[in-house]
Amino acid sequence: MTESTLVALRSTLLWASLATVLVMLPGALLAYALARFEFFGKRVLSTVAGLPLVLPPTAVGYLLLRLLSSDGPLGRETLGIDLDILLTWKAVVLACAVMSAPLVIRTARVSFEGVDPRYEGMARTLGHGPVATFFQYTLPMASRGLIAAVILGFTRAMGEFGATIIIAGNIPGRTQTLATAIFSAQQAGQDAEADFLLVIALLVGFGAIFTTEYLSRKPIAAAAR
Amino acid sequence: MSAFPTLSARVRLPLDRFDLDVGFETTHRVTGVFGVSGSGKTSLLETIAGLRRRATGRIRFGDDVWLDTPGRRFVPPEARGVGYLPQDSLLFPHKTVLGNLRSGMRRAMRNAVDAEGTLHNVVEVLGIGPLLERDPATLSGGERQRVALGRALCSGPRLLLLDEPLASLDAGIRRRVLPFLDRVREQFDVPMLLISHNPIEVQALCDDLIVLRDGAIIARGEPRSVLTRSEVFPIAENEGFENILPGVLVETSGETSLVRLGAHETDPLIVAPRSRQRPGSRLMLSVPASDITLSAARPTGLSARNILPARVDHIRDIGFWRLLSARISEHAPPLVVEVTSAAIDELGLAPGVELFLIIKARSFSLYEAPEAA
C-alpha cells in the first residue's frame, strides 16, 4: 500500500464529509421550500437543482471549470480576487457538493413531503412559532428521510469522479480521491492497489444502501382498532 | 356558572364547492356546530384556530381581535391561545404520550397557568395515567382522542376547538369516551366550540347549536329543539333520533339500575340496564325515539319496566313521520318519540294532552366512563 493511496482514502472521507455538510443545510432548506410552498419559478428551480443527476459528470465539471477559470464569471478577472479553487482540495469538495446536491435535495424533499403539514398547524396552535415548529416538529418527523439524504449524499460524494477529475485533477497526495486512485491504479496495472480500493468502495457502498433500507422500513404499524 | 368571553366571528372562506360564509356570536360554555361532512365545519374551526390564511372577515374572542381583514390584522395560531383537537388526533409520532401532553406546556407557563397542576388534573380526569410512557402509534382510537384532548387542555387554552371528537370511534368506544368529554366540560373552566355530525354528541354536550349546510348557517338554538326541526332532522337522521338524558344513579340491584332523570327529588325515576358507577354518580343515558311506545291510558300487565306519565309538548311533521316531544317533568328535557300520523289521529294527540311513555329498561344505553381509578 503506497503512502499516497492512504492519503487519498483519508482525504476522500474528509472531503466527502465536508461536501455533505456544505450541501445539507441549504439543500434541506431548499427541499423544505419545494415540499411546502408554491412560488414563482419553483419548477425551474427544482429542475436546475436536479440537473447534475442527469448530465454527464464531466459536463458538470467542465461547466464549473468555465465558471471558475480566470476569465469566467467567478474567475480572478471578473471578481478581482482569486478564489484559488481549481486543482486544489477545494475543487474536490465543490465537485462532490454539486454532484451530490440533487440526491440530497430530492431525498430531503420527499421526507418533508411525508410530514403532514397539519402536524405543523397543530404545533402552531400549541404555541410554537414557525421556526420552533420547524426545528422541534418538522425536522424530527422527517429525520429518517433526512438521515437517508445525508448517507446518499455522502456516498455520492465519495464516488465522485467525472467532475472532480476535470476541476481538481488527479494529483496523488493533493487532489487524488478513492475514485481517481482506482482509475490511476488500474491504468498503471497496480492490481493489488486497485483491489484494495475496490473492497473499500464495496464496503462503504453496501453499508450506505443497507442503512437506508433499514431507515425506510415502516415504523411499528399503528395498533389498528 | 361563570360567564365566558364572547366569541364572535363573521368570516368568509372560499372552499371547493361553495364559500364558507358565517356570522355568529356566543357566550355559552359549549357551542356546537352541526352538519353533514363537507358542510364547512372543519374549515370554520381551522379558521378560528388561525390555520386558514385565506379566510377574511373578523374574529374576536373576549377583548382580543384575532382576525380583522379591513384592519389588516391576523393573529397567528400560536398567539391565539386555543386548544385544538382535530378529528384524527394528530398525536406527534416522535414523542411519547407524556411528550405529547407536554408539547404545549411552555405556552401554558407563559400564560401563568399552573402547568404541572393542570397536567396532573388532566391525566386524572381523562384516565390516561397508565398510557404516559406509550408510543402514540400503539394507542387505540379512544385512547388517542383522550390524549389529544389532554394535550389541548395542558396548553392552557382560553378556548377549546373540538373537531368531531368521537367521529372516528365505533359506537361502543364512543359510549365510553363521551363521559370524558362531559367531565372536561364540568371540570375545566374553558369554553368550547364543538363540531359534530352526531346528534348524540351535540345533545349530550352542547348548550347552543349552530347548524351548517353548504357553508351557511341554517338553524340555531337549543340543541334538542333545533335537531327536531324539519329542516334539520333529515341531516341528523342517520340511525334515527336518539334522546340523550343526563341522570344521577340512585341504586343498582340485580341486572338493573335506578336512575333519576334530573337533580331534583321530584324528578322521575327510570329503570335502566345495570351501571358500574357508584350511587350518586352523574351519568348519561340514551334511548332511541323509535323505541318509545305511547299509550293513552296507563297500561297493565306489561313487561316494560318504565311507564312514565307525560304531557305532549309539541308535535313536528318531519315529512315521513312525526316527532312528538313529551315532558315527563318540569326540569328534565322533553323526550322525543317517533310516531306515525295515523297513531296521532287515533290517540287524538295534540299539545297539552296527557299520556304514558312506555320504555323497556333494555332500550336505554348507558354512557359511562370506566370507573375512575
Image (spheres, rainbow, N blue to C red):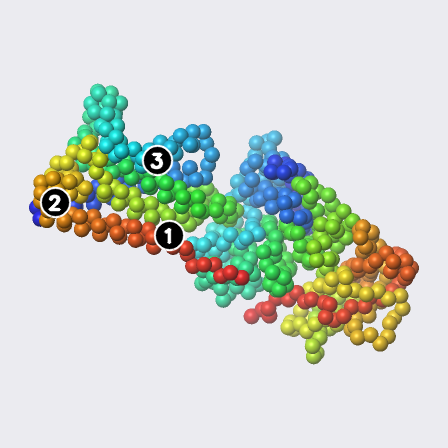
Query: Regarding mark 2 in the picture, which secondary structure is present there?
Result: helix
Q: Secondary structure at mark 1?
A: loop
The numbered dot on residue A5 is 2
Q: Quadrant of the C terminus of chain B?
A: bottom right
* Amino acid at the residue labelled 3: Gly
Of residues B44 and A136, the one nearer the viewer is B44
Label 2: chain letter: A
x, y (%) of residue A37?
Answer: 46, 36
Q: Quadrant of residue B66?
A: top right
First in residue order: circle 2 vs circle 1: 2
Q: Residues within 10 Å of mark 1 (few under 14, many from 20)?
A: few
Disc 2 or 3, which lies upstream in sequence? 2
- Residue B85, compared with residue B77, is above or below; it is below
Q: Residues within 10 Å of mark 2 (few under 14, many from 20)?
A: many
Q: Is residue B45 above or below residue B280?
A: above
Earlier along the polypeptide chain: callout 1 or callout 3?
3
Decide: few, some or many residues near mark 3? Use Cα within 10 Å; few <14, some 14-19, many ≥20: some
Q: Position of residue A41 (x, y in %)?
A: 43, 29
Name the residue carrying label 3: A50
B128 lies above or below B17 = below
Disc 2, disc 3: CB below 8 Å? no
Q: Which residue is mark 1?
A: A216
